[in-house]
Image (cartoon, helix red, strand yellow):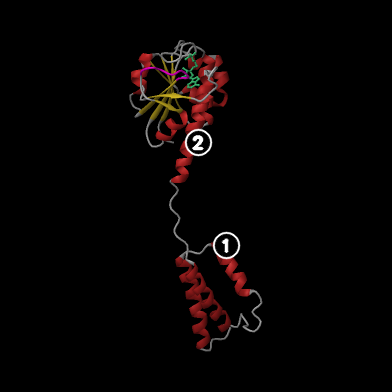
């Protein structure tokens, strides 16, 4: 996956750090950064380890940094998550919009403290303020839950773009080419006396449905026409099966 980091700023509850590690790992990410956590040993606490559960590896390798400046500087886009609207600061977008623009760029999701969220000055390190749509009269998620929603949205967005980027499938043979192949094969099958024109049964229809199911490429049509040609030629030369 592309570079996506998950930054928790001045987190108070070590359990939230563990739960956040679990959320990002379940969604396929692994870069957790703690900036100035209240407990500098947060990633080694029993609470964090217990709540991280199977994401103990992500927790153990989480980086602990002293400033937001260091934590955000390698990301092209930095999304500062907040439930509250701000009068000033970077442009405000929804989490879905954020994940859509983040597809091909290094990005960081920055989460505020449990008690006060992100301060105005923290937005100096953000390219966008990002909100998660919620109940307008009670919109504040628990920190790790907010991480979970963002990680899920980011995963969905990356998967959609991966699907769009699937290599273009080569075009199949067109209907005219298939019809010509069927006619060629019919002649060949008559030539080798596999097909009796007075009792054709459903042979050609069954072959046709086989080819339709397969979805032949032009080269495969050419190959089968080569086979038909040889069947006719061998017969002309008096070849006996
Ligand atoms: N009491 C704080 C919110 C703390 S929740 C306040 O009033 O701001 C902890 C963090 O989770 C927030 O700083 C924010 O980064 C994130 N968060 C919680 N709910 C959110 C929402 N609805 N939209 C965006 N971020 C949210």
Q: How many marks?
A: 2
Q: Which mark is residue 194?
A: none
Inspect the magenta stretch and tell me whether residue 84 lies in it.
yes
Q: Position of residue 33 (x, y in %)?
A: 43, 21
Q: Closest to the observer: 123 or 92?
A: 92
State whether residue 111 is above or below residue 100.
Answer: above
Q: Can you tell which quarter of the image residue 206 is in?
A: bottom right
Q: Position of residue 88 (x, y in %)?
A: 36, 18
Among the two numbered marks 1 and 2 on one chain, the one whose residue lies closer to the N terminus? 2
Q: Please say whether residue 217 is visible from this viewpoint.
A: yes
Q: Name the residue beneath numbered marker 1.
A: 213
Secondary structure of residue under mark 1: helix
At x 45%, y 55%, the residue is 169
How dense is the environment of label 2, judged by Cα within 10 Å: few (below 14), some, or many (20 and up)?
some
Please report the bounds of the magenta region as a residue range.
82-88
Q: Closest to the observer: 64 or 173?
A: 173
Q: Closest to the observer: 144 or 90?
A: 90
Q: Name the residue beneath numbered marker 2.
A: 156
């Amino acid at each position: 996956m592309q570079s996506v980091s998950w930054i928790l700023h001045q987190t108070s509850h070590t359990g939230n750090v563990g739960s956040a590690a679990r959320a990002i790992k379940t969604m396929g990410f692994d870069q957790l950064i703690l900036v100035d956590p209240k407990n500098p040993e947060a990633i080694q606490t029993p609470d964090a380890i217990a709540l991280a559960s199977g994401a103990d590896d992500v927790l153990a390798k989480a980086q602990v940094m002293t400033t937001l400046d260091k934590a955000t500087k390698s990301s092209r886009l930095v999304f500062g998550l907040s439930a509250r609207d701000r009068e000033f600061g970077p442009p405000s977008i929804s989490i879905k919009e954020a994940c859509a623009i983040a597809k091909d760029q290094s990005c960081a999701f920055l989460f505020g403290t449990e008690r006060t969220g992100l301060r105005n000055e923290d937005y100096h390190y953000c390219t966008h303020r990002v909100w998660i749509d919620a109940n307008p009269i009670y919109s504040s998620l628990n920190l790790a839950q907010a991480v979970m929603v963002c990680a899920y949205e980011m995963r969905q967005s990356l998967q959609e773009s991966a699907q769009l980027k699937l290599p273009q499938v080569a075009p199949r043979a067109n209907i005219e080419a298939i019809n010509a192949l069927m006619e060629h094969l019919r002649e060949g099958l008559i030539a080798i006396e596999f097909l009796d024109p007075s009792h054709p049964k459903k042979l050609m229809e069954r072959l046709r449905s086989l080819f339709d199911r397969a979805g032949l490429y032009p080269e495969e049509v050419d190959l089968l026409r080569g086979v038909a040609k040889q069947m006719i030629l061998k017969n002309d030369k008096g070849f006996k099966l």
